[in-house]
Image (cartoon, rainbow, N blue to C red):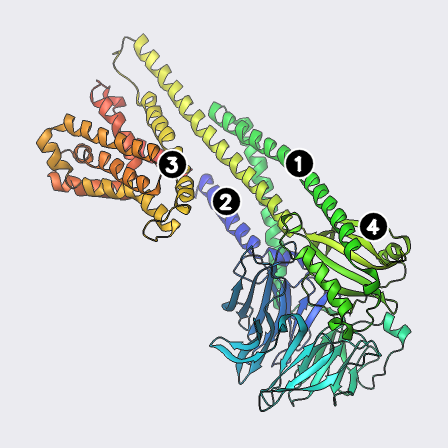
Amino acid sequence: MNMKKRWKAGILLLLVLMTVVWWNRKLLEINPFHPVMADTVYRVITCEDQSLLVADKSGNRIYRINQDRQIEFVLNGTRSQNGFYDAKQMYSGEDGSIYLLDVRRTGSRKMEQERILKYDRNGKMVQVVSDIRYDENERVYKNAINRIDGLDGKIVWFQFSGDGFSIMSQDGELRHFPYEEAEQYLVDFAINPATGFCAYLTKSGEIYEEQENGSFRKVYSADDNKLQIPWYIDYSLDGKLYFADIGTRGIYRVENETDAVLVMNTTGSAAPQELSEDELRESPIYYNFDMGDRLATTDTYGVIVGDLGAEAEYLTEFPLTGALKMQVCAVWAGAAICVLGCVVLFIYGIYRVFRSKDQFIHIVAGMLAGTAILTALFTMIVLKDWTARMTEEITGRTTSVSGLAAQLIPGDKLERIHSIQDYEGEDYQTIRSIARSIFASGNMQINDLYCVIYRIQDGMITSTYSIEDYVGAIYPYDWPFEGSDEQHILETNEQMTYMGLSSSEGSFIFTNSPILNSNGEAVGIMEVGTDLYNFQQDNWKMVREVMTSAAVLAVTMILIVSELLIFGQGQEKRRAALAAGGDKTCIPASMLRIQVFLIFFVTNIPKAFLPIYIMKQAETESVFGLSPAFLVSIALSAEVLFGALTSFGGSAVLRSIGRRKTALFGSILFVAGLCMRAVVPTITSFIIGNGVMGAGWGIPSSDHSGHDRGERSGGKERGIYRIYGGILEWSELRRCIRRVSDQLDELPVCSHDRWNHEHTVPFIQRTVYF
């Protein structure tokens, strides 16, 4: 193998390696020599084989932890339809398969799509179980699918409907339960594995359980004299009902309507004790849990797994299995090789450019370097300035909207909310109605903004309202209040704006404004902001478009310059021949090929914009009820279709009226079709005009086909040959070549420069490919 082949093989292997590394790029975020910390865990569930599924706060990364408490594999989220993006719910099937509720939102937290995805035991996506898409004009903020569970060996889920909620499966609706405004008032659901009956939890802290006759009975109600906030419910395998209380910060087992037994909190699970008010402020919150044959939950700082009545296992870090560690190391090594290979190729390319004496190589290198420099300057200067201006505009809107919305919220009513039972009271519903009238009205000026209302309850930061309408009257956080920005806002009545604040859930711009009561005292905080994901994606889209346009421009300029250089070489060759007394009519092929290039270039550039124009026209017309996409395909294919069909009878027309009249007739048809498209810009005229244009070159094409085959076949065979030429052999290019070929037939060309299709066609095909 010579050196050139080795270089080609090396570059090919480098491209393959870069593809593999890019496909596994998420693994580059993991340090193979350091365990993964459990300080960003959002949800934990147990599997049939005692392994764990752990999701982080962002919802776009899930770990499977084996029985040895090592990470077996990692599921990484993606914005594409081939995976999940924000896993809000998880469920493990009996066969080890994984079911995820994937939720996608806009910057204003408005719903875009929600799906249930199924993965196999090894983390490979199997199918989309359920898919709900929302129109961009719909003002929906809360996902319809609430909980994934199991029933009689099937995977089911609870889904809100217009007049209640339903238990759904892949076979459709299994059971429906009427409940007025269920989407607003209900928080969570669960299915009793022992009986198959379900239970639901309300925002007022009441738990209802289904009875044999289909009705629901209240089995627990939170004490309105205490900060009790039941938030998540689940059944054990023996049919006992448990709930997580984010107010008292513990997990309880329901005994009767007023009593519940504490089974776990920060004091442990062997003999847990209720916490004092001071201890509550310092204790973590268990927002969810999984109660199978063992208890599994998280306090966002670690994972807790154990049997009830015994001391639980507290996990704060997870090492990688040997196989996963080798995989991560391989990706890191591959990335290092790719970087090193690119550097070597870059240095070698510069070396070859400086060593080369070929003028064409220098010109191409200069064009590529200039394109790269201009693209970099645009990205660093123009795009940076545009990003700064857009960030300033978003910040200005969040600041003004937050201040105005805070003034509209009645602080006196907000101040009177003290328990979750106040959710159904007049004060809370007034506040909720005002907030929704502002942010869920569809106003285009604030269409991309969300809002959250905070207040301080018993020394804790709590949320009273959010645009998603998930929380009830009180939803506590485990953020410390003392020394926080929230304390500063409430004490000084000042606004605070946060630009590009990043968290595990994304990057945000938002403004916090104080909500005042009638005495001018700050009693709450209005947060207004937007998720910067779409904004960042628009930036990257602009960068990609600039780079693509620059690459296309560079390739186009290289093609033009190369043709000019070849033309210049042909001129020098002809001058030398004339100086030596050669024939003046002898024209080198290198001077003639530029005609083919220019004909192709000029006639095909407008065709890049034709589909866009036809699509816009098709969207405004209705032709036999056909879809716009189908009409566009008909309009674009009509020319080739009619050209192929009319070529069957082209030889008959040629024999009847002769070659010259046939060419004239075809030209008239071609011009007529072109005028029809231009003068009457409707989708019907496009279709008819393209058909007439196709007939214009289809009828005389059999004459050219005869030249291609040396007139060895009859008329019908020439027509059929034209079909294959039009469909399979670059019909547009061959027409350009034949136009020049016809001119050459009339010139006495030197034998060593005679026009040769075998050299020209591959060149034009390479041009079209670029």
674 is higher (above) or lower (below) than 200: above
The quarter of the picture where residue 115 lies is bottom right
Q: Which of disc 1 and disc 2 is earlier in sequence?
A: 2
Left or right: residue 229 compared with residue 558: right
Q: Which residue in the structure is indicated by mark 1?
A: 380
Disc 3 to disc 4, how far (Cα)? 55 Å
Query: Would residue 70 be seen by someone viewing this image from the given angle?
Result: no
- Helix, strand or loop at label 1? It is helix
Q: Amino acid at mark 4?
A: Gln
Q: Which residue in the structure is indicated by mark 3?
A: 607
Q: Amino acid at mark 1?
A: Met
589 is higher (above) or lower (below) than 760: above
Q: Amino acid at mark 2?
A: Ile
Left or right: residue 724 compared with residue 548: left
Which of the two residues, 471 or 612, is positioned nearer the viewer here?
471
Residue at (68%, 56%) from the top-left corner?
A: 439
- Helix, strand or loop at label 3? It is helix
The quarter of the picture where residue 260 lies is bottom right
Disc 3 to disc 1, how far (Cα)? 34 Å
- Helix, strand or loop at label 2? It is helix
Q: Nearer the viewer, mark 2 or mark 4?
A: 4
Q: Residues within 10 Å of mark 3 (few under 14, many from 20)?
A: few
Q: Are marks 4 and 1 in contact (CB under 8 Å)?
A: no
Q: Are marks 2 and 4 in contact (CB under 8 Å)?
A: no
The quarter of the picture where residue 651 lies is top left
Disc 2 to disc 4, how far (Cα)? 56 Å
Name the residue furthest left. Answer: 656
Which of the two residues, 474 or 103, is positioned nearer the viewer here?
474
Q: Which of disc 1 and disc 4 is earlier in sequence?
A: 1
Q: Nearer the viewer, mark 3 or mark 2?
A: 3
Q: Amino acid at mark 3?
A: Lys
Q: Which of disc 2 and disc 3 is earlier in sequence?
A: 2
